[in-house]
Amino acid sequence: MRKCMNHFVVPFSIFALLALFLPLASQAQTGDETLDQHLTDLQGTPPESLSEKVLQETIIQMVQNMPAPPATPSQARRFLIRGETALEMIPGKERFRRAAVEFREAARAAPWLAETHFKLGQAEENAGDLGAAISSYKLYLRAAPGAPDAMDIEAKIFKLEYQLEIGASAPETPAKVASPSPAPKISGVELLFYIRPASTPEPKNIKSLASDFRYLVKYKLTGKALVEFDIDEKGKTSNFRIIKTSRQDIYDGIIQKLVRKFRFPANAPQMGVLYDLTLCLKSDQISPILCNIHFEKINDGAGDSPALVAYVIPFYNQNAANKGICGNVVVRFDVDSSGAVKNQEVVSASRSGQFEINIKRALASFKFERGKPAKGIEYKISFGLPGRCEAP
């Protein structure tokens, strides 16, 4: 019987020793090697997956227990700058979706950086992806538990959770995002074109895009509005009302002033005239543009990857606008130590001869970070006409 007992005591003692030494072995593997392994594993997880969030939380906790945080990887900084550039340069809500892609990569490259999760949460919230924004804000609080705005972010999470619960969408007007370029000063609104039922009259003094409407003003932020009004005996509009609008906060007061300018033939009164308007805001601080001109950085080039701090949007070629021509141009240039653009060249143009000269003039006013020269940076500039054609 004793022999039998000894037979079982030996294996048990081995397991006991393993139980004692396994924690020591795992401790021996902690540190930079374990962090590197976790980061490698993180790159293999699908974006926005549960496994990604679990690994990010694990890395955050691990770094917080280290004597000193690791250095910020250059890849994380690169993606942060790309995201900030998307917010500066891409018009409309698309900028938040594009920025979220870049900030997400930054968060995967360095999950312990609270800044990456905060900026990702902002971009996702403004893009309307509330569930993803909640997760990012929670990771921000994990990465910065003592942040001075922790209570505010927690309140934001509660608010977004409620919005998600009742099926509400993100606010139509996104939160303001800091940009190194000055915000444009809005000076008014301009009608791009309108659509009306065939049975309704056309104003004598205002032409639509289809009627050779000319682009002679500064445009920013496209919007749409369905309006109804009456036409009196003198050809003036009255009883105006907005049925719906995409930017109620901006257009409500301005559209009425615009429609009051319509003049129709006299002695032809009509009630309940419907017009579907497409408009842009006019700005006094940027070059004359259309709604759908945007930039995309497609090559960082060689050097220090300087951030763009000031830019001018190019003119839309008047003849191309009149003919309904859209397109894009890829340009390559260098940046000197003062942040100025040098050695411009056109790499490709979808519609040769239409947009290149205006782009060259605009690029001459671009300003990048000083002291970070680079060569071979490439941008794609796309030109589109709302309601007529999209840039390829």
Image (tube, rainbow, N blue to C red):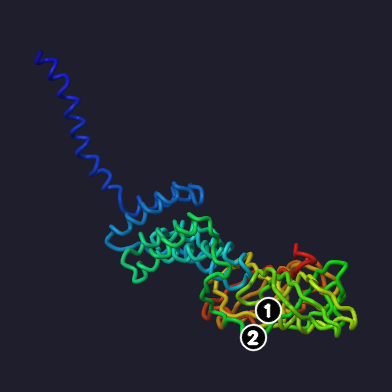
Instruction: Answer above or below: position of 239 versus 163.
Output: below
**Residue assigned mark 2:** 285
**Residue assigned mark 1:** 281
At 73% from the left and 77% from the top, the residue drawn is: 240
Residue 350, given in percent of the width and then of the height, sits at 79, 65
Instruction: Answer above or below: position of 145 versus 255.
Output: above
Residue 136, given in percent of the width and then of the height, sits at 45, 59
Instruction: Report the number of numbered marks.
Output: 2
Relative placement, left or right, of 40 versus 208 is left
Relative placement, left or right, of 1 versus 54 is left
| The N terminus - image quarter | top left
Instruction: Answer above or below: position of 27 versus 117.
Output: above
At 79% from the left and 76% from the top, the residue drawn is: 230
Residue furthest toward the left? 2
Residue 189, given in percent of the width and then of the height, sits at 70, 81
Amino acid on which the number 2 mark rests in the picture:
Gln
SS category of the residue bearing label 1 = strand
Residue furthest toward the top? 1
Tell me where residue 116 sits by quadrant. bottom left
Q: Of 126 and 366, which appears nearest the observer?
A: 126
Question: Do residues under tags 2 and 1 come within 8 Å of each other at their CB atoms?
Answer: no
- Real-space CA distance between mark 2 and mark 1, rounded to the nearest whole angstrom: 12 Å
The answer to whether one can see residue 375 in this image is: yes
Amino acid on which the number 1 mark rests in the picture:
Leu
